[in-house]
Amino acid sequence: MLRIKLVKSLYGQIPRTRATVAALGLKKLNHTVTQEDTPVIRGMIHHIKHLLLVETVEGVAVKAPRKRIKSVAKAPAPVAAPVVVEKPAEEAVEAKPKARAPRTKKEKES
């Protein structure tokens, strides 16, 4: 386990650095969090090591975040689909192309 403390301000830091601090769970100056010692966390720490104080801690249990339970609305009862009756196929009628409106004066005259 790692105990990570933000000891320098984020004022003037680039957005990528601010996002890394937020991803570690640090919110403001002198805030301390405990994280698992994984390569991902170590990489984040390496990226912003100039802002942090890191200690290795053994035997500390991390409290798991509570999961929010979303209320599930009951879905309405399924409705039977309407029955569609197909009509017998009629003879195919060829569609005539529609006449377009004349666009120019010459087309109007002829």
Image: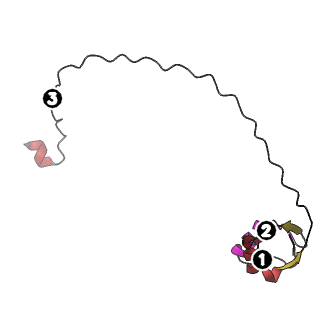
Is residue 4 found left or right of 80 in the rendered image? right
**Which of the two residues, 14 or 42, is positioned nearer the viewer here?**
42
**Which of the two residues, 74 or 19, is positioned nearer the viewer here?**
74
> At label 3, which amino acid type do we have?
Glu
Quarter of the image holding residue 63? bottom right
**Residue located beneath label 1 in the image:** 45
**Residue located beneath label 2 in the image:** 24
> At label 2, which amino acid type do we have?
Leu
Q: Earlier in the sequence, mark 3 or mark 2?
A: 2
- Tags 1 and 3 touching, CB below 8 Å: no
- Tags 3 and 2 touching, CB below 8 Å: no
What x and y, as percent, mark residue 89?
Answer: 23, 20
Residue lying furthest left in this view? 110
> At label 1, which amino acid type do we have?
Ile
Quarter of the image holding residue 107? top left
Q: Residues within 10 Å of mark 2 (few under 14, many from 20)?
A: some
Q: CA distance from mark 3 to mark 2?
A: 70 Å
